Image (cartoon, helix red, strand yellow):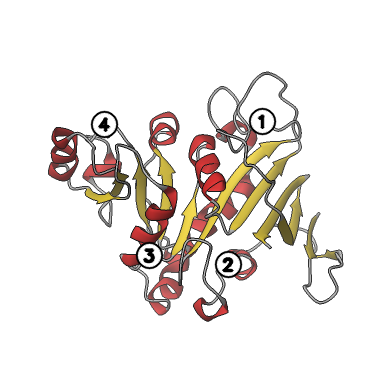
Amino acid sequence: MRRLFPVTDETAETVAQTRGEGEWSLAELAEAYAYPEPEAGAGAGGPGSWLRANMVSTLDGAAQHDGRSQPISSAADMRIFGTLRALADVVVVGAETVRQEGYRPARAREEFSAAREAAGQGPVPAIAVVSASLDLDFSLPLFTSPLVPTLILTGAAAAPDRIAAAEKAGARVVTAGDGVGVEPARAVRALAELGLTRQLTEGGPRLLGQLVTAGVLDELCLTVAPMLTAGDAQRIAGGPTVRVPQRFALVSLLEEEGFLFSRYRRT
C-alpha cells in the first residue's frame, strides 16, 4: 500500500489519503517535490537559491551500512532519488562520498527532458564536488564523460597542481573559500551566480553537517528505512554541534512498503 500524508500550512494537520496499490509515478513525485518558485522567497543561502538535502537513515539512525547508503535504500527511494536529481540544477556532494559511492555523471532521463527544457535547464544537473585537497581520481567517468562539465568547489589556497589536473580532465574549478577549504555559504552563492539555483546535496554526513552548521540548508528530504543495523555507522549529519537546534517544519510524508519519505523545510 502507498499513502500520501500532505501537511497544509493553514491547518498544520496531517491528513492521510490512501493512493492505492502500485508505484508512485514519476509525474506524481515531480509534483510532490517541486522546488518553490523564485518569487516565493530566497533560500537561506541568498536570493533565488534553494538548497535541499536528500538522505536516508535507518530506524536507529544509521546513514550507511558497510560504508554505503545503498544497502538501506529501496526501489521507491531510488525513484525519489532520481526525481530529485531530475528537478535540480546541480547536485552538491562531498569528495569522500564520491570516492565511497563510486559517483558517476548524472544521466539524461527522457521522461524529464521536456520539463527540464521548459524550466530552462540543461539535459542533466551538474555534479559539484566539494573538496579541499582535490584528491580525486580524474580518470573516472564523473570527470571524463559527463553531459555537462563536473564542478569542483574548493578554497583559494588549494594546491595549484591539483587545480591544473582537475581542469586538464575537463572539470571546472570554482573558488568558494579564502583558505584551503570551502565555506558553505560561499559555495551556495557561487553556484547561484552560475545560474544553478535549484540545488540538491546528497551528502555525505560530513558535508551535510557543515551545511547545517552554516545555516544554509533550506529543506531536508529524509527517507526513513524500516531497518535496524546497530553498530557505529554515521548519522546523516556529522561535525560540530550547532549552538541552538534548528527547527524545520514537516511539509509532506509519503509511505511505500514501510519506507517513510519525509520532507521538511526551515521555519
Figure check: 54 above or below 84: above
Pointer 4 or 1: first along the chain: 1
Badge 2 or badge 1: first in the primary sequence: 2
Answer few, some or many: residues within 10 Å of disc 3's Cα (few below 14, many 20 plus, some between 14 and 19).
Answer: many
C-alpha gap between disc 3 and disc 2: 22 Å
Rounded to the nearest angstrom, the CA distance separating label 2 from label 1 is 27 Å
Assess whether mark 3 and mark 1 are in contact (beta carbons under 8 angstroms): no
Q: Earlier in the sequence, mark 1 or mark 3?
A: 1
* Comparing labels 3 and 2, the label whose residue is closer to the camera: 3
Look at 61% across and 65% down and name the residue there. 33
Work out whether mark 3 precedes mark 2 in sequence or the reverse, and give the earlier one. 2
Callout count: 4
Residue bearing mark 2: 30
Assign a secondary structure to mark 2.
helix
Q: Are marks 4 and 3 in contact (CB under 8 Å)?
A: no
Q: Label 4 to label 3, Cα distance in Å?
A: 27 Å
Q: Amino acid at mark 1?
A: Ala
Q: Residues within 10 Å of mark 2 (few under 14, many from 20)?
A: some
Which corner quadrant holds the N terminus?
Answer: bottom right
**Residue situated furthest front in the rendering:** 243
**Please, what is the three-letter code of the amino acid marked with disc 3?**
Ala
Per the image, the residue denoted by label 3 is 192
Helix, strand or loop for disc 4? loop
Left or right of 27 in this view: 137: left
- Name the residue carrying label 4: 137
Is the C-beta separation of discs 4 and 1 under 8 Å? no
Q: Earlier in the sequence, mark 2 or mark 4?
A: 2
Pointer 4 or 3: first along the chain: 4
Quarter location, residue 205: top right
Location of mark 1 (residue): 62
Q: Quadrant of the C terminus?
A: bottom right
Mark 4 nearby-residue class (10 Å; few <14, some 14–19, many ≥20): some
